[in-house]
Image: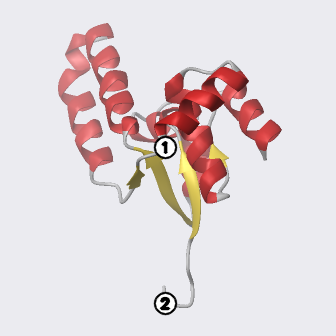
Amino acid sequence: MGASEARALAVVDASVFGALAFNESRSGEAAGLLAGVTPVAPGLVRYEMANIARTKALRDPSSSGLVTRAFRRWLELPVKLVSPEFDGVLSLALAEDLSAYDAAYVYVASALDAPLLTFDMRLASAWRRLG
C-alpha cells in the first residue's frame, strides 16, 4: 500500500475483536468489517479481550492453551490504542444510559468521526443516535 492509500480509521470493540480472535460464529463477518481499516480502540479493549479469554478458558479448561495463544495473537494486531477524555465518557454514559466502558468506544468514535464496529446492538444504537 502506497503512502497515498491511507486506510480509514474505525473504532472496534471487543465483540468484533473477540469474534475474530477466538474464531466465534461471526468471525468471518468480523474479518470483513476489519478489512481495509486501521482499527482504533480505547485502551480498555485489552482488558476486555483478556476477560473474554479468561471466561472461555474457565468455561472449557481443556481449551486454555488454545485460548491463550489466540489472545496472544490478537495482542500482535496493529490496533491504535487511544485514551478518551474521561469527563466526556462519563457525560456520554449518563446521557445514553451506557456503561463507562461502552461509552468509551462511542466517545472515541464520535471524537474521531469514525465508524464504530460492534456486534453489540445497544452500543451500535447509541453510536447511531450520536452520529
User: Given contact means CB atoms under 8 Å apart, are the residues at marks 1 and 2 in contact?
Assistant: no
Q: Quadrant of residue 79?
A: bottom left
Going from the N terminus, do you reach mark 1 or mark 2 first? Answer: 2
- Indicate left or right for 57 with 130 as reference: left
Q: Residue at x 57, y 38 (%)?
A: 88
The disc label shown at residue 3, or none: 2
Front position in the image: 115 or 89: 89
Q: Quadrant of residue 120?
A: top right
Cα distance between the residues tagged 1 and 2 = 30 Å
Q: Residue at x 61, y 53 (%)?
A: 111
At mark 2, the secondary structure is loop
Residue type (three-letter) at the residue carrying disc 1:
Glu
Front position in the image: 67 or 87: 87
Q: Residue at x 42, y 51 (%)?
A: 82
Q: Which residue is mark 1?
A: 85
At mark 1, the secondary structure is loop
The spot of residue 131 in percent (x, y) is: 78, 47
The spot of residue 28 in percent (x, y) is: 57, 45
Q: Residue at x 30, y 29 (%)?
A: 50
Q: Is residue 25 visible?
A: no
The spot of residue 4 in percent (x, y) is: 56, 90
Mark 1: few, some, or many residues within 10 Å (few <14, many ≥20)? few
Residue type (three-letter) at the residue carrying disc 2:
Ala
